[in-house]
């Protein structure tokens, strides 16, 4: 079992929900980003989702678009993103890292070379927004063969007929996107999310984590309560955008984690 | 020619691939919708009623067939090959874009969609979409890069007159690529009631094939018209390429006529060199994945997409339709680049010799005709796609020629 599986097994044994935090690698620059990432586990983050910057993030709202632009302007690349993960791993062997981004930088790097480099850097899973099951041969199957989890997004438009195809080659956990929309837009509603999560859980043994549209500790608690955990991204990234020092960003992350863990 | 196994017209395969190009690289939220669109398109494609409705609208609303015009003064001036123009600039709304829009809107109506979104560069696709939405009483939202809103202002006003909402996109450099990103974001958000009317042969499967099929009316007519006028096929066909829809429309019916030379003309901007101030994806890019498909893209070593440059807003896109990437790699079509400066020279020559004010996009095709025609005999027939008229571009051209449009009667600024 990989780090992701171990982490969810621990959480289940403790009867706790998972808190997953997203930050963009290299935002606003390599050093300050590394400082935030290093502080995430102590702030209560169970799984780190590390954004891979891309010029054209089609599923992201302005907050994460701008984070990617800041990172790219500061010289961030796929190689440096992996270097950041490697630096983090020097001090933390247990916290899973999921790399989240778009396919082109990976395709450009070369899939086999990328999987080798990602594994060496201590990456545990991948979320690649523009690779649906129809394109599994591109990266999903090679990643699974290398022991890297491929975490799929399920969405409100993933109907029952399609759900098995979405779950087929998914590993680690299932990421339920709580809204039809882009990151940082609409607010997730627990009463709508609950039945959808139940529908997915009936079809898989994997943990289901809910993301998109969670903005404060109360929402983190409420949404995490409907599933096995929740993801917060834009609300954290917005604080980095405001130029808050790492300790303030991490204090806010700790409040979110406390919310999720109270569920 | 009718050897099924060697046809260039068989693609895409069931996964939407032309060789390695194409595919469906979209988020899960959109995937069920794209599969439904594909299903509905396949039904419509085989339904004679669907095509009967299209034909009637093409004839009475668009004004098809567009003429096939022998450009005698231009032919004489260049002193070589005989030049024909396929006059799609005479279509209602002034470009080829409406051929495709009608098809997609009829499909949207069949699917019960009430809200139409589109991206636009030059504004021609936006105007065509706003037009057809007005005709059918559908809500229309057009995403347009902020840079393009400025340089194609007549078209912005047209869209507004037609009742569309035009949303300027400020991310990136504010051109077609950024407009497409925001249109995709809108679609993900309003997926259930919205139909995304893509303006070129790009995007996830089935768009590249569907848009090609709707635009193929250009090539089918061209073939019949030249057979009637000349009793044979042309020797060379040429079209400009932004995403590649007017070109695919002209080329597709000729793909298996191997004696016909096919040339696509990309926007060379300030020149195809290391500075990357151009939009020649095939000449200066490499394969990558953007906007739902794998194709040649302008990108850096890290796979980040580069902002190109072209004087022509309609060609200012860092990608190209996947079928062109495939035709390039298998060698069935040739692709060349024309600079801003060469396109402007073609603009002037076309106005002076033929009394036709062309859009800057087909000026790129014409500029390549100017390069090759003089070296060819009069018996060599070239057919170029005059896919748009130049009304929208007069401000850009005036600026490039140093002409003061705000002067008392308009006079040379220099
Ligand atoms: C007149 C004209 N030609 C060409 C294009 C480029 O598109 P495509 O390559 O899809 O024909 C445009 C796009 O706006 C246009 O308006």
Image (cartoon, coloured by chain):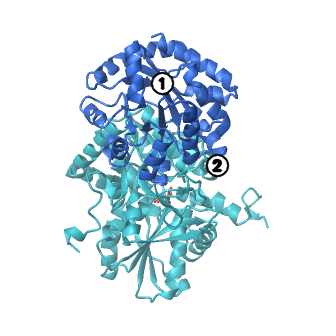
Label 1 CB less than 8 angstroms from ligand 1: no
* Relative height, residue A56 to residue B333 (above, below): above
Percent of width and height locating residue A171: 34, 33
Q: What colour denotes chain B? A: cyan
Chain letter for mark 2: B
Report the side of B13 relative to A152 (left or right).
left
Question: Spatial distance from mark 2 to mark 1, Cα to Cα?
Answer: 40 Å
Percent of width and height locating residue A84: 58, 39
Q: Given this view, does label 2 or label 1 mark the residue nearer the observer?
A: 1
Give the SS element for disc 1: strand
Percent of width and height locating residue A192: 38, 17
Which residue occupies the foreground of this view, A103 or B53? A103
Report the side of A59 relative to B360 (left or right).
left
Residue sitting at x 33%, y 53%: B210
Q: Which mark is residue B150?
A: 2
Report crowding for label 1: few under 14, some 14 to 19, many 20 or more residues within 10 A (C-alpha): many
Return the residue at label 1: A231
**Is residue B98 something that shows in the picture?**
yes
**Is residue A226 something that shows in the picture?**
no
* Relative height, residue B96 to residue A66 (above, below): below
The chain coloured blue in the image: A
In which quadrant of the rendered image does the C terminus of chain A lie? top left
């Amino acid at each position: 079992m990989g780090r992701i599986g171990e982490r969810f097994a621990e959480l289940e044994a403790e009867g706790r929900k998972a808190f997953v935090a997203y930050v963009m690698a290299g935002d606003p620059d390599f050093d300050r980003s590394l400082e935030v990432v290093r502080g995430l586990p102590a702030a209560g983050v169970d799984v780190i989702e590390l954004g891979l910057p891309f010029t054209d993030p089609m599923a992201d709202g302005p907050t994460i678009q701008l984070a990617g632009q800041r990172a790219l302007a500061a010289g961030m690349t796929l190689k440096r993103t992996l270097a950041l993960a490697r630096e983090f791993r020097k001090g933390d062997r247990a916290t899973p890292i999921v790399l989240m981004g778009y396919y082109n930088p990976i395709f450009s790097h070369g899939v086999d070379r990328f999987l080798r480099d990602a594994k060496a850097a201590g990456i545990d899973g991948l979320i690649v927004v523009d690779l649906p099951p129809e394109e599994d041969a591109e990266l999903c199957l090679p990643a699974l063969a290398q022991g890297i989890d491929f975490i799929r997004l399920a969405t409100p438009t993933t109907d029952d007929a399609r759900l098995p195809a979405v779950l087929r080659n998914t590993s680690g956990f299932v990421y339920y996107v709580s809204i039809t929309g882009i990151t940082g837009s609409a607010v997730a509603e627990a009463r709508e999310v609950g039945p959808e999560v139940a529908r997915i859980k009936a079809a898989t043994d994997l943990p289901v984590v809910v993301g998109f549209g969670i903005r404060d500790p109360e929402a983190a608690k409420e949404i995490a309560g409907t599933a096995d955990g929740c993801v917060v991204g834009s609300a954290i990234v917005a604080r980095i955008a405001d130029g808050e020092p790492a300790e303030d960003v991490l204090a806010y992350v700790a409040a979110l984690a406390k919310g999720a863990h109270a569920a | 020619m009718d050897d099924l196994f060697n046809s260039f017209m068989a693609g895409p395969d069931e996964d939407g691939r032309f060789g390695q190009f194409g595919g469906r690289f979209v988020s899960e939220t959109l995937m069920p919708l794209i599969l439904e669109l594909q299903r509905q398109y396949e039904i419509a494609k085989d339904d004679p009623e669907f095509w009967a409705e299209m034909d009637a609208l093409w004839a009475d609303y668009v004004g098809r067939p567009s003429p096939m015009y022998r450009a005698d003064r231009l032919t004489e001036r260049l002193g070589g090959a005989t030049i024909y123009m396929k006059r799609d600039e005479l279509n209602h709304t002034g470009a080829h874009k409406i051929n495709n829009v009608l098809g997609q809107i009829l499909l949207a109506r069949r699917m019960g969609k009430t809200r139409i979104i589109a991206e636009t560069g030059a504004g021609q696709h936006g105007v065509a979409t706003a037009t057809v939405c007005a005709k059918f009483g559908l809500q229309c939202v057009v995403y347009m890069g902020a840079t393009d809103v400025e340089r194609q202002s007549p078209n912005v006003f047209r869209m507004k007159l037609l009742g569309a909402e035009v949303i300027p996109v400020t991310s990136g450099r504010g051109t077609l690529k950024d407009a497409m990103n925001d249109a995709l974001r809108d679609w993900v958000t309003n997926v259930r009631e919205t139909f995304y009317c893509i303006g070129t042969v790009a995007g996830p499967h089935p768009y590249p094939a569907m848009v090609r099929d709707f635009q193929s009316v250009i090539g089918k007519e061209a073939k019949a018209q030249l057979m009637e006028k000349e009793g044979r096929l042309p020797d060379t066909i040429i079209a400009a390429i932004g995403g590649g829809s007017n070109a695919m429309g002209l080329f597709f019916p000729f793909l298996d006529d191997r004696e016909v030379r096919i040339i696509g003309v990309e926007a060379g901007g300030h020149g195809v060199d290391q500075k990357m101030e151009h939009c020649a994806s095939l000449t200066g890019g490499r394969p990558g994945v953007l906007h739902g498909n794998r194709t040649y893209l302008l990108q850096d070593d890290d796979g980040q997409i580069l902002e190109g440059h072209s004087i022509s807003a309609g060609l200012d896109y860092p990608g190209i339709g996947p079928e062109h990437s495939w035709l390039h790699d298998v060698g069935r079509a040739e692709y060349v680049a024309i600079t801003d400066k060469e396109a402007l020279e073609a603009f002037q020559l076309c106005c002076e010799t033929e009394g036709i004010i062309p859009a800057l996009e087909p000026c790129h095709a014409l500029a390549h005709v100017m390069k090759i025609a003089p070296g060819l005999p009069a018996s060599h027939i070239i057919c170029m796609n005059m896919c748009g008229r130049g009304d929208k571009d007069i401000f850009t051209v005036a600026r490039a020629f140093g002409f003061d449009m705000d002067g008392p009667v308009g006079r040379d600024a220099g």
